[in-house]
Amino acid sequence: MELGILKLIYVVIDGMGDLPIEELGNQTPLEFAETPKMDFLAGRGKLGLMYTVGRGVAPESDVAVISILGYDPYKYHVGRGPLEAYGAGLDMRDGDLALRCNFATLGEGKRIIDRRAGRNLTSSEASELAKAINSLVKLESYPASFEFKNTIGHRGVLIIRSKAGPLSAKISNTDPAYERVAGLGVAKADVKMILEDCVPLEDSEAARISARLVNEFVQKSHEVLENHEVNKRREAEGKLKANIILTRDAGNALPKFFNINEKYGVKFACLADMPVERGIARLAGMHPIELPPPSGDLVHDCLIRAERLLDILDDFDCFYIHIKGPDEPGHDGNFMLKAEKIAIIDKHFFGSILPKINLNETVICVTADHSTPCKLKAHSDDPVPLLISGGKIESDGINKFSEKECRKGSLGILEKGTALMPILMKTIKET
Ligand code: ZN
Ligand code: ZN
């Protein structure tokens, strides 16, 4: 640790931001939830709001995380596929085609019954299916090989490697829920649940070859999945089959981030469990801390993350911690569950670390990567709440952490997420 630098604990709570909800008396889930620990931090520190990418942009997590770690997403973003692949531990080289995938349920014709195969595919089921795909599918439309890996639940990644020249990422998604706008993955407002064909998005041989390879993979993997034992078992148990792979967010290179440690003269560690955030953090030069995958029990997951953080507190200066939880109920419009998840994070993550941390020597920042308003059931461009507390930071005198209170804070409104990291670095060095 460098002398004179405070520690930074930078906590990003996925999709925490929201809008007032009538049933909650026009409070947001964060405002409604019992959050005495974050309220305490708010009271000791400064508050503000932040557009994580910029006004008018409802970002996917990858784009937002890149931005709030201090990298201009318009300059550095290369598609989610390569980040997911890298984060999942696959070997990704320039010219390889990497895609984010979902196991989904295909019905009659091209109708998609569920984009997440009922959202109850276990890791062991997914691993069995991935193994079958890797051993039974052969790509023949062009000299190429592939590697498919399941990651968490219904999620996976695909890399296609050409044996003759680089592949192109200028291809469309087969997943009907997302489209590509200026290269960035954007959730569609009006989703038709039909399996799309992958089509080239530019007039080039490489794009045509790449699209053909993706379609071939989707078709052939469907044949393997449809009659697989795992799916026969799921059908017998009344569950949806995981019989199709949806692809999206193609990329053919890794982003060339500057090294975050060198740039700021600190040592960063990352505690994140999803491949995309892990991938971004590793590419930024952060040390990835091994974590078990999310167990489905947020209390347990928060306790483990708190314990791991306390274990390594002496070994690094800065810690980027990404906690899943409120985003999913936001997508489902379940505001009570979203508030409950926020309260769990407050009690079991912050409640576990605060008694063990000297706030005079530590700066804690709490924010979100984007808002996922329950009434929209999707990410939005609404600014996220932001608090910075600890060290010599003077208090704004606001004893509550919520979107409304943050609007009154002295940090004001950050128009871009890229502005946050320089502020945090200045704060931990002003000792
Ligand atoms: Zn997110
Ligand atoms: Zn989300």
Image: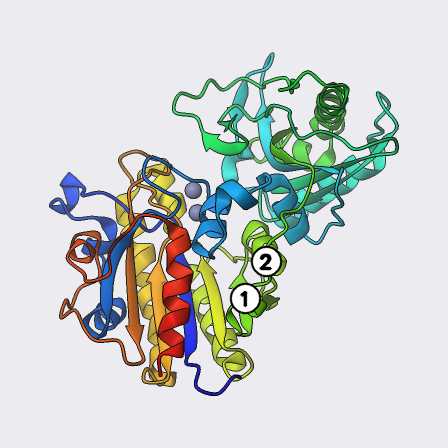
- Packing grade of label 2 (10 A; few <14, some 14-19, many >=20) is some
* Disc 2 residue: CB within 8 Å of ligand 1: no
- Callout 2 secondary element: loop
Residue 194 location (% of width, % of height)? 54, 17
For the point 74% across and 27% down, which residue is it?
Answer: 217
Instruction: Choose the circle earlier in sequence order: 2 or 1.
Output: 2
- Does residue 190 sit above or below 259 in this rendering? above
For the point 80% across and 38% down, which residue is it?
Answer: 134
The amino acid beneath tag 1 is Lys
Residue 86 location (% of width, % of height)? 67, 50
- Callout 1 secondary element: helix
Which residue corresponds to mark 1? 263
For the point 13% across and 44% down, which residue is it?
Answer: 26
Whether pointer 2 and pointer 1 mark residues with C-beta atoms closer than 8 Å, the reply is yes
For the point 52% across and 81% down, which residue is it?
Answer: 311
Quadrant in the picture for residue 183? top right
User: Could you tell me how many numbered marks the image carries?
Assistant: 2
Quadrant field for ligand 2: top left
The numbered dot on residue 258 is 2
Q: Is residue 310 something that shows in the picture?
A: yes
